[in-house]
Image (cartoon, helix red, strand yellow):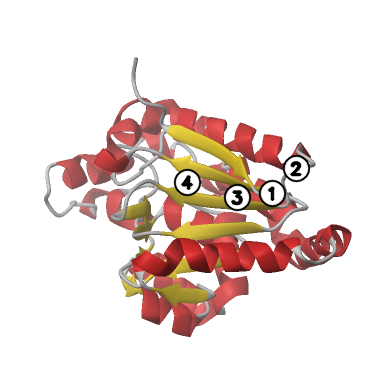
Amino acid sequence: MTEKEILYDVKDYVATITINRPKVLNAFTGDNIKEIEALLDKATKDGKVGVIVLTGTGERAFCVGGDINWEKGSGGKSGLQDLDFRFDRMIVECPKPVIARVNGYAIGGGHHIAYFCDFTVAAEHAIFGQNGPRVGSPAGGYIVGHAANVLGHKRARELWMLCRRYTAKQALDWGLVNSVVPMAKLDEEVRKYCDELLSVSPTCLKILKRSFYYHMDPIMGRDMNEMIKEVAPGFFSTGEQNEGATAFLEKRKPDFSPWR
């Protein structure tokens, strides 16, 4: 039997969902995302859960997005097209507070999961950034657009188009995270947020979350696949995505000039 790749635990009214793939820096596959979605739904419906925490195993990574080996194989050919990333929408539609416990790298899909959470608490060594354009992995629609809600348009475009890396301190200065603490204090800080949230009215929190959702509502109808079909129909058959993934695995700079 293999070790479970997604862990779930409920303790003291806090549900913790953990990506348990440390060998690949907690990168996810399509099956992983579907399981996380099911667990988020389970926690949402559980009356003994007041706060939900998302995190990754170990001290190296929260999540570095989609597993490139998966994206180069079935992920790129069908998985990315079939995966609607409903998970990000589920976070903002969830009536309970969701906290990202960022214990290391938060890159690509892992990073936008973190900034969709209601709160992001990071260890001092955490690194943030997007990666899609570097590896030919497309993202679009509300997943990208919400970055402008968090950061403003100039910073959001820098984040997504340049794929730079940012320290936890820079992320705090930008407003990407709420709190930065030493790794040894991370669980204590997350628990502090949980206890404060558990001490207030859950119905008021539900109303507040829905209010913030309505602010986001104008962009929520545009998902990634719809955007790809509109701007770049047939993208996954052109070879551009495969070049990005192959270059990453071969540790070389991709050559995107044929698609310029």
The one of 156 and 26 positioned closer to us in this rendering: 26
Mark 2 element type? loop
Is residue 112 toward the left or the right of residue 116 in the image?
left
User: Looking at the image, which is closer to me, 195 or 256?
Assistant: 195
Q: Nearer the viewer, mark 3 or mark 1?
A: 1
Q: Position of residue 257 (x, y in %)?
A: 22, 54
Residue at left offset 27%, top offset 34%: 69
Q: Which residue is mark 2?
A: 48
Residue 181's x, y, as percent? Answer: 41, 74
Q: Which residue is mark 4?
A: 232
Query: Closer to the camera: disc 4 or disc 3?
Result: 3
Looking at the image, residue 216 sits to the left or right of residue 63; the answer is: right
Q: Position of residue 96 (x, y in %)?
A: 74, 54
Mark 3 and mark 1 lie on one chain; the one further toward the N terminus is: 1
The numbered mark at residue 88 is: 3
Task: Look at the picture and state if 118 lies above or below 254.
Answer: below
